[in-house]
Image: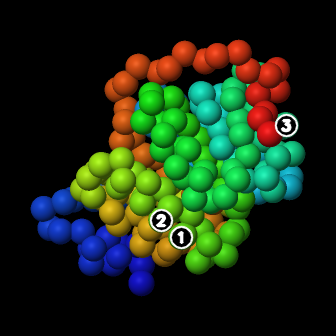
């Protein structure tokens, strides 16, 4: 089933989605206060410019331990980062930080098995639903091709896991959830120089 078919099947006619066909990267804006970005990153190799761009604007980065070396190399000084204890606790902490007005990036290893990738996204969906984010809330999904081209989909929050499941596992995704945007960002307290916790 294609992404368009999934969106058409799961979204009511009254809830439109927008799909922007292929455009050059990077087109993503800054990570804003109250936003939660989920971004996939390969554990080995150079950190892509698009990821560096995202990390420059984040107050908080929560990452899987497999990404420790990549995060240490790419994390700007003064940015707070912590390893995920479990996928569920990482989702809960990501949502809590975003709800408190921080700009949050949740980094996942690229090329996770599709079931695991979908489960990680569903963990975030469940935590956001518990935080009273409505199912009709729009989210952005950016799928990146190896040739530096992206496909941009804007769809309903409650369709997110199903849409993510339709992408091949070797297509890096960035998901932007602006459920708590507009709030004042909390002030950073003193952090260790490299920003890494744990």
* Among the two numbered marks 3 and 1 on one chain, the one whose residue lies closer to the N terminus: 3
Relative image position of residue 182 (x, y in whole percent)? 35, 26
Judge from the rendering whether residue 102 lies leftward or rightward of residue 83; answer left or right: left
Q: Label 1 belongs to which residue?
A: 118
Camera-near label (3 vs 1) is 1
Pointer 2: what residue? Answer: 122
Residue at (42% x, 59% y) in the render = 125
Q: Residues within 10 Å of mark 1 (few under 14, many from 20)?
A: some
Q: Quadrant location of residue 109?
A: bottom right
Coordinates of residue 96 in the picture (x, y in percent): 48, 40
Q: Quadrant of residue 161?
A: bottom left
Q: Secondary structure at mark 2?
A: helix
The front one of 81 and 15 is: 81
- How packed mark 3 is, by other alpha carbons closer than 10 Å (few <14, some 14-19, many 20 or more), is few
Q: CA distance from mark 2 to mark 1?
A: 6 Å
Q: Where residue 70 sits: x, y (%)?
A: 82, 45
Q: Are marks 2 and 1 in contact (CB under 8 Å)?
A: yes
Residue at x 70% of width, y 53% of height: 85
- Foreground of the two, 68 or 146: 68
Please identify the quarter of the rendering in which residue 1 is found.
Answer: bottom left
> Residue 180: x, y in percent?
37, 36
- Quarter of the picture containing the C terminus is top right
The residue where tag 3 is placed is: 73
Asked if residue 194 lies left or right of residue 102, the reply is right
The answer to whether residue 150 shows anywhere in this view is no
Q: In the shown orientation, is residue 132 left or right of residue 47?
A: left
C-alpha gap between disc 3 and disc 1: 27 Å
Figure check: 113 above or below 52: below
Q: Nearer the viewer, residue 131 or 101?
A: 131
Distance between the Cα atoms at labels 2 and 3? 29 Å
């Amino acid at each position: 089933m294609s992404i368009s078919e999934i969106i058409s099947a799961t979204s009511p006619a009254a809830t439109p989605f927008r799909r922007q066909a292929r455009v050059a990267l990077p087109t993503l804006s800054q990570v804003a206060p109250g936003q939660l970005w989920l971004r996939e990153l390969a554990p080995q190799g150079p950190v892509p410019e698009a990821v560096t761009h995202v990390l420059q604007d984040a107050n908080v980065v929560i990452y899987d331990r497999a990404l420790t070396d990549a995060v240490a190399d790419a994390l700007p000084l003064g940015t707070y980062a912590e390893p995920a204890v479990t996928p569920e606790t990482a989702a809960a902490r990501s949502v809590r930080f975003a709800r408190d007005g921080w700009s949050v990036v949740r980094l996942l290893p690229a090329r996770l098995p599709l079931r695991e990738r979908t489960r990680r996204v569903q963990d975030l969906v469940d935590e956001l639903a518990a935080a009273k984010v409505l199912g009709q809330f729009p989210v952005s999904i950016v799928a990146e091709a190896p040739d530096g081209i992206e496909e941009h989909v804007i769809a309903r929050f409650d369709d997110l896991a199903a849409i993510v499941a339709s992408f091949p596992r070797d297509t890096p995704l960035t998901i932007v959830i602006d459920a708590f945007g507009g709030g004042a960002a909390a002030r950073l307290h003193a952090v260790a120089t490299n920003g890494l916790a744990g």
